[in-house]
Amino acid sequence: MGVVDHINTAARKVPVWGVYAAGLLWPAWLFYLAVSGAIGIDPVKSLEHELGELGLQALIFGLAITPLRSIIGINLIRFRRAIGVLTFYFVSAHLLVWLVLDVQILSEIWKDIVKRPYITVGMAAFILMTPLAITSNNMSVRKLGPRWRKLHKLVYPSAALGGIHYIMVGKTWELESLLYMAVILSLLGWRVYDSRRKQRARDLPTRDSANPA
Amino acid sequence: MAYKNVLKYSDVTPKADYMNRRQLMGGAAGLFAGMAIGPALGASKYSTDAEPNTFEEISGYNNFYEFGTGKEDPARNAHRLTIDPWSVQIDGMVDKPGSYGLEDILKAVTQEERIYRFRCVEAWSMVIPWYGFELNQLLKMAGVQSGAKYVAFETLVREEEMPGIRSVNIEWPYREGLRLDEAMHPLTIMATGIYDKPMPKQNGAPLRLVVPWKYGFKSIKSIVRVTLTDKQPQTTWNMLQPREYGFYSNVNPEVSHPRWSQATERTIGGGVFAKRKETLMFNGYEQEVAGLYSGMDLAKNF
């Protein structure tokens, strides 16, 4: 049995509710660390940063599920909704820490959102994610039909904006945020490549039939 | 042939001695406590009476990109720095240019405690009990020539001891500068210690600048070169992002950083639920330094 099979077998044993539970508890644990002073000398910044990074990681993980299956055969598709919902939860927690613990002042919050590009970009990413979180239930999938798939493509611009937001937060060009962006762009790039490939595969037979030798 | 001093930097003022000296000052302050108005006698009139941050906070949360860009990187990596022997090249428009051994500098100056507010451009702040001497003493030692208008500073570059030199994309050395009148101001000090300890390496040992009314990045660390010049010197953050970091970089709640407001600050040490504090003009040193900038448009000269 190869590594891929091992991973698939192991993944089958993980209940989806377990992923939800771990994901829900993780920010609570970080918050506990922050309150108890175990997360660094500037706990608000550390918490904000950790949650934002967690959101990006979950987003990347969610985007990686399809290529993982398609390229190497690792099948994690049944976790995808949980990962998506948790991404929104992490990003909401990140936003909440920024609002309540960091900026605090209501008038400053609004000023920051309009005046500061990196906040604007981050907010845009969050807003794009919101309808995805709202429609991440079976009823919405049924009701929206093919439009559901279309709507959920919003995750692509949202991911790109999230990556840009992280780069813009840094005082200089920081390697870590650039690596995140590189991963996001390759996951999006793969989708472009894959859809073109499928398009060509669909086109080929027609061309052949139109041109009988 | 360079003169090699066998004395170590720590030999000049043994810790026990300056500790004793402070006890004496403390005692004197106690004696006169009944008469004292404002801060205790013996403490510098330039010191704030705000509660200082802990040594752990001050030495565990630093921006010193030569040791990495994370706030904890300097504390983790700076132990590799060799600070003994240490000398400072003083050159440019001075009467006595040359390489000054730190021991010789410290023999010639008067050191004292200065408890200053410290405001980072990233909108956080601390209160730090520095130990050091006024920069004007050093400049007088070298003899400033009449045409000099600015002072330029450079941090050590030593790749084998500073991992950030290779990994961080900045044109080294780290550079800073002051106008001569700013440099001569009694609030401007060269610090050699924090609390009763020698300067931690992550805070810029063995000798760093402290300009309390300017954003923290102006207070350049681990200084190896001081140059008197008649031209405004290049400064690192201004070279990187001229739109975001000006030459003056005076603390100013009314002039926002393009990416965040400078109106308020988070005080380090207050915990998760600490309220933000209003940032003060010139970081609360308006009375002392506003005169240096009279007639200047501070929004333009940010």
Image: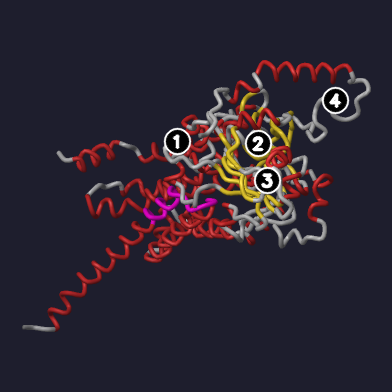
Instruction: Measuring from the top left, give residue B294's x and y in whole percent.
Output: 82, 57
Separation of marks 1 and 4 at Cα, in angstroms: 42 Å
| Picture disc at residue B41 | 4
Mark 3 or mark 1, earlier in chain: 3
Q: Are marks 3 and 1 in contact (CB under 8 Å)?
A: no
Quadrant of the rendered image containing residue B225: top right
Mark 2 or mark 3, earlier in chain: 3
Q: Amino acid at mark 2?
A: Ile
Mark 1 or mark 4, earlier in chain: 4
Instruction: Measuring from the top left, give residue B72's x and y in whole percent.
Output: 52, 35
Find numbered disc 2 in the image and state the secondary structure of the residue it sits on: loop
Asked whether the viewer can see residue A99, the reply is no
Separation of marks 2 and 3 at Cα, in angstroms: 43 Å
Separation of marks 3 and 1 at Cα, in angstroms: 33 Å
**Crowdedness near tag 3: few (<14), some (14–19) or many (≥20) residues, C-alpha within 10 Å:** few
Foreground: disc 2 or disc 4: 4
Mark 2 or mark 4, earlier in chain: 4
- The residue at which mark 2 appears reads as B268
Q: Are marks 4 and 3 in contact (CB under 8 Å)?
A: no
